[in-house]
């Protein structure tokens, strides 16, 4: 098989990374509102109520202390204790009762928003995973050729987990802390503008520290997510190739490569968390300094009876106000610390969200085709007409925009390539001026060394990739005009590497045609020469397969894949080195199944074992992307060219 050029995802190790893209956070919020607008609004209201309730004790503390201070003043004067209590005790009870009521409202709001947010978070992640998987199904083969499977899996695991933390914890706590800070600042301004200015000095210091340290850590959290994806991609690759690793004693080399990736991940994660872990202690200590500063300034203002500038109407700053400010400053710095702490979690969550959005923003497989495959009936004059029922006759429905007419062309399996050029990478052509034709029922074989371009031709017929120049016609129709789904529905393919899915044997055969009956699946298995061994399995066709059919031999797995292609009953078959990895005896069994499958179909065969293609109608010999010989087996032997050398053993395939 031909190899595509790999462009590993992610940057080169050690290269400085960009920060999270602008607009990522807004996009997360947009998706949340798109899926759960009503619950999100409810959560926002509950968070505001809960935050205000949490910030309220400071203002009530100041009120109660003022009542107590006034009562003590009365007692120290001419009034008795009974009169002082009678005057202020009811006010204190009312104030405390109001505070209890606010706490109850905050408790109910917290209960509602936490319960609602749990459902929103899991539902949101469910929808995002669905969006990613749906998008993945629409991506071209090129995407999977240029991205490691482990890195793709990392989107569904690590990136989704960081998004979960962002939505369920970071955003709600950030909103709560922000609302609390705003509420506390309003209370501070209400009590004393002078004392509020002291707090603002501390805020400026905290903001500078957060910007310097938090900003420096942001890029490393992005790098951490990328390095994690690379490490997981390598682990997945090594797991799949563990037998090869052990056979070639490659364990030490694999370990060394992993340690390099693991060291890079450790370095990025350590640097990111150094910034994160340094930020909190610094902010806490600034809070402690601010705490002392408020006490110092407050005492000076009280002792010197400096006129108080406030919205409360208090003429001079009172001790009760200073005590309340001490509590509010603690609450203020704690919430600033909470914001700073969540900033790191938000950055990491946004790094994961950005990678998710990169997947969602990938260009889907382009398909501008408009010719579709339909069931048809044929009258006595040979005219085709579309039918809603399955008739056994397939036709290409070709609408013509010029005059609005629709023509029907019978699906026969006539495939022609005219002067085709192609390269997996621009400016690096791997197929040069390839022209060939396969009439219905013909068997065309491709022969050549690895990298000659054999599999590339079949990839172009499937439209896994689009050609750079030339034309490919299917039953006289340019395949660019045929919808890809319909084109691929008319083609069957059996690959060297068999992919079986978790499920029963019957389910795996039915994969070729989802509406096939059990009888059709069994008939396909008999045609593929697979029925006898399937009936010997523990549960026959209902035997469960796991791990790509790991309990079956390579030949048995290949026979099931042939049966899967047979049940689809396509007019064109592609057999890509389907017998190259099995022994000669098993090959004869598989070959019998394939011969039955090939009858009456247009078949493209790629094989290194030339004995399997002797009966082909036409054999194409490729070398470095060019067809250098073509003809039947006897014709090519008579020419005594490259094929003759390959067949007689004078020259071996690489």
Image (spheres, rainbow, N blue to C red):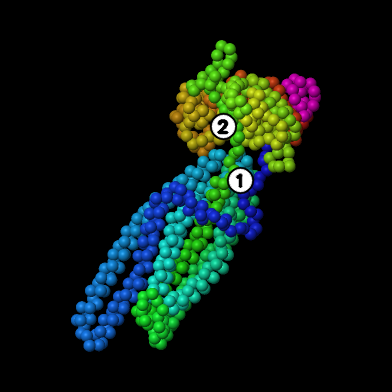
Q: Give the range drawn in magenta.
A: 628-644
Tell me if residue 635 is in the magenta stretch: yes
**Label 1, label 2: how many angstroms apart (C-alpha)?**
23 Å
Which residue occupies 64% across, 51% down? 253
Q: In which quarter of the image is the N terminus?
A: top right
State whether residue 50 is above or below residue 539.
Answer: below
Q: Is residue 392 visible?
A: no
Q: Could you tell which of marks 1 and 2 lies nearer the N-terminus?
A: 1
Q: Alpha-carbon neighbours of circle 1 within 10 Å: few (<14), some, or many (≥20)?
A: some
Residue corresponding to mark 2: 485
Residue corresponding to mark 1: 147
Between 373 and 234, the one nearer to me in the picture: 373
The residue furthest right is: 640
State whether residue 492 is above or below residue 27.
Answer: above
Q: Alpha-carbon neighbours of circle 2 within 10 Å: few (<14), some, or many (≥20)?
A: few
| Coordinates of residue 351 in the picture (x, y in percent) | 54, 55
Q: What element carries label 1?
A: loop
The residue furthest left is: 82
Q: Residue 384 has which mark?
A: none
| Coordinates of residue 10 in the picture (x, y in percent) | 62, 52
Relative side of 487 to 51, left or right:
right
Relative side of 72 to 508, left or right:
left
Q: Quadrant of the C terminus?
A: top right
Which residue occupies 51% across, 41% down? 134
Q: Can residue 364 be seen in this view?
A: yes
């Amino acid at each position: 098989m031909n190899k595509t050029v790999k462009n590993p995802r992610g940057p080169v190790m050690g290269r400085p990374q960009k920060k999270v893209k602008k607009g990522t956070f807004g996009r997360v919020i947009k998706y949340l509102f798109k899926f759960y607008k009503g619950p999100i609004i409810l959560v926002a209201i509950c968070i505001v109520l809960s935050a205000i309730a949490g910030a309220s004790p400071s203002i009530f503390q100041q009120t109660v202390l003022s009542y107590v201070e006034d009562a003590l003043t009365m007692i120290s004067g001419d009034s008795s204790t009974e009169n002082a209590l009678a005057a202020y005790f009811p006010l204190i009870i009312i104030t405390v009762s109001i505070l209890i009521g606010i706490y109850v409202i905050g408790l109910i709001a917290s209960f509602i928003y936490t319960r609602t947010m749990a459902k929103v978070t899991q539902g949101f992640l469910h929808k995002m995973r669905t969006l990613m998987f749906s998008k993945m199904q629409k991506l071209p083969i090129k995407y999977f050729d240029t991205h490691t499977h482990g890195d793709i899996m990392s989107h569904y695991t690590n990136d989704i987990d960081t998004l979960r933390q962002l939505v369920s914890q970071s955003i709600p706590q950030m909103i709560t802390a922000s609302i609390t800070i705003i509420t506390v600042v309003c209370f501070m301004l209400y009590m004393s503008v002078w004392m509020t200015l002291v707090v603002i000095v501390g805020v400026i210091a905290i903001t500078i520290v957060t910007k310097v340290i938090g900003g420096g850590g942001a890029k490393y959290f992005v790098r951490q997510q990328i390095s994690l994806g690379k490490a997981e991609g390598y682990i997945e690759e090594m797991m799949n190739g563990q037998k090869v690793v052990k056979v070639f004693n490659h364990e030490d080399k694999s370990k060394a490569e992993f340690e390099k990736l693991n060291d890079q991940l450790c370095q990025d994660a350590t640097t990111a968390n150094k910034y994160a872990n340094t930020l909190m202690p610094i902010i806490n200590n600034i809070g402690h300094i601010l705490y002392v500063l408020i006490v110092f300034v407050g005492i000076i203002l009280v002792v010197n009876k400096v006129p108080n500038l406030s919205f409360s109407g208090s003429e001079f700053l009172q001790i009760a106000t200073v005590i309340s400010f001490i509590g509010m400053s603690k609450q203020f710095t704690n919430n600033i610390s909470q914001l700073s702490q969540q900033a790191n979690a938000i950055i990491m969550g946004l790094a994961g969200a950005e990678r998710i959005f990169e997947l969602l923003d990938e260009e889907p497989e382009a398909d501008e085709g408009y010719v579709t495959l339909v069931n048809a009936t044929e009258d006595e004059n040979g005219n085709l007409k579309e039918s809603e029922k399955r008739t056994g006759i397939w036709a290409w429905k070709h609408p013509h925009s010029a005059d609005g007419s629709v023509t029907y062309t019978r699906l026969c399996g006539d495939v022609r390539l005219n002067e085709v050029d192609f390269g997996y990478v621009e400016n690096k052509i791997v197929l040069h001026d390839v022209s060939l034709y396969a009439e219905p029922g013909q068997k065309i074989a491709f022969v050549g060394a690895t990298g000659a371009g054999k599999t590339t031709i079949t990839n172009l017929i499937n439209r896994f990739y689009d050609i750079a120049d030339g034309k490919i016609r299917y039953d006289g129709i340019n395949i660019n005009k045929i919808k890809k789904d319909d084109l691929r529905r008319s083609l069957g393919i059996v690959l060297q590497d068999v992919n079986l899915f978790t499920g029963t044997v019957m389910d795996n055969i039915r994969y070729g045609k989802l509406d096939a009956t059990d009888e059709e699946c069994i008939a396909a298995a008999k045609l593929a020469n697979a029925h006898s061994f399937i009936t010997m399995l523990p549960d026959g066709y209902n035997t469960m397969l796991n791990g790509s059919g790991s309990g079956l031999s390579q030949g048995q797995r290949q026979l099931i894949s042939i049966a899967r292609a047979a049940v689809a009953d396509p007019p064109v078959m592609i057999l890509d080195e389907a017998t190259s990895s099995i022994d000669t005896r098993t090959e004869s069994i598989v070959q019998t199944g394939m011969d039955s499958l090939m009858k009456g179909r247009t078949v493209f065969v790629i094989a290194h074992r030339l004995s399997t293609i002797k009966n082909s109608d036409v054999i194409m010999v490729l070398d470095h992307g060019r067809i250098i010989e073509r003809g039947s087996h006897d014709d090519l032997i008579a020419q005594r060219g490259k094929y003759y050398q390959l067949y007689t053993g004078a020259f071996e395939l690489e």
